[in-house]
Image: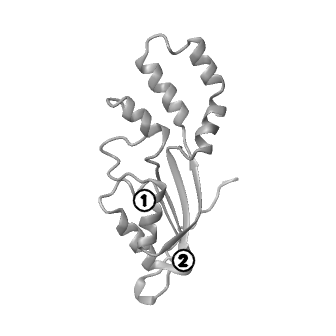
């Protein structure tokens, strides 16, 4: 009918994915939200290294263990709301450990970004654990300035997620 969009299923060849035997390879691989939840994250990186073209790159997104959210979880140990929720997180990464893992399989980081909801996480836990905190003048002030407080976390790379783009060495 009018306005309908015809979609054609994309094949592996459309996306640049080809089998190893033909020596054709992919240009990029994205692992967002997966390396920390599987038993062998290095196998993901090794497979990517085998399949990527010489100009290919890998994009990896994982929780940042060195985040404010991790410290919040260490403080409020019985409540994991969204960051490093057991049993989902099997592996914990720091910036250094992720760079080391990528280096071990032949990747060199080109760029990294940190992002998260760490200050919101802190406010949520404080609200859950202290009667009268939510709605108090202190809570309202912190909530009204949440972006500014999160910027401090951002500037110190203490966000709960990191995204790294790396190329083959």
Determine the image quadrant of residue 19: bottom left
User: Which residue does the numbered mark 2 point to in the structure image?
Assistant: 16
Q: Find residue 14 and report its horizontal and vertical position in percent.
A: 56, 75
Q: Residues within 10 Å of mark 2 (few under 14, many from 20)?
A: few
Q: Tell me, yes or no, whether the two marked residues, 1 and 2, touch with CB atoms within 8 Å.
A: no
Secondary structure beneath dot 1 equals helix
Of 30 and 18, the residue lying toward us = 30
Q: Work out which quarter of the rendered image holds the N terminus and state it.
A: bottom right
Q: Residues within 10 Å of mark 1 (few under 14, many from 20)?
A: few
Residue sitting at 41 percent across and 72 percent down? Answer: 104
Q: How many marks?
A: 2
- Whether residue 82 can be seen here: no
Q: Is residue 155 above or below residue 12?
A: above
Q: Residue furthest right?
A: 2
Q: Find residue 2 and report its horizontal and vertical position in percent.
A: 70, 53
Of 160 and 53, the residue lying toward us = 160
Of 1 and 70, the residue lying toward us = 70
Q: Is residue 111 above or below residue 14?
A: above
Secondary structure beneath dot 2 equals loop
- Whether residue 54 can be seen here: yes
Determine the image quadrant of residue 20: bottom left
Determine the image quadrant of residue 149: top right
Q: Find residue 35 and report its horizontal and vertical position in percent.
A: 40, 58
Q: Residue furthest bottom?
A: 22
**First in residue order: circle 1 vs circle 2:** 2
Q: Is residue 154 above or below residue 137?
A: below
Q: Find residue 146 and report its horizontal and vertical position in percent.
A: 62, 29
Callout in the foreground (1, 2): 1
Q: CA distance from mark 1 to mark 2?
A: 30 Å
User: Which residue does the numbered mark 1 point to in the structure image?
Assistant: 97
């Amino acid at each position: 009918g009018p306005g309908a969009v015809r979609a054609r299923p994309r094949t592996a060849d459309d996306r640049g994915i080809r089998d190893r035997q033909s020596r054709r390879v992919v240009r990029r691989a994205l692992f967002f939200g997966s390396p920390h939840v599987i038993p062998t994250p290095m196998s993901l990186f090794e497979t990517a290294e085998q399949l990527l073209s010489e100009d290919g790159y890998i994009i990896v997104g994982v929780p940042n263990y060195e985040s404010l959210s991790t410290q919040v979880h260490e403080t409020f140990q019985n409540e994991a709301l969204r960051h490093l929720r057991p049993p989902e997180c099997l592996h914990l990464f720091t910036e250094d450990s992720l760079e080391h893992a990528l280096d071990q399989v032949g990747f060199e980081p080109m760029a990294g970004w940190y992002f998260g909801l760490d200050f919101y996480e802190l406010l949520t836990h404080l609200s859950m654990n202290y009667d009268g905190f939510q709605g108090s003048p202190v809570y309202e002030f912190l909530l009204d300035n949440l972006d500014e407080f999160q910027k401090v976390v951002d500037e110190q790379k203490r966000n709960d997620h990191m995204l790294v783009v790396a190329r083959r060495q």
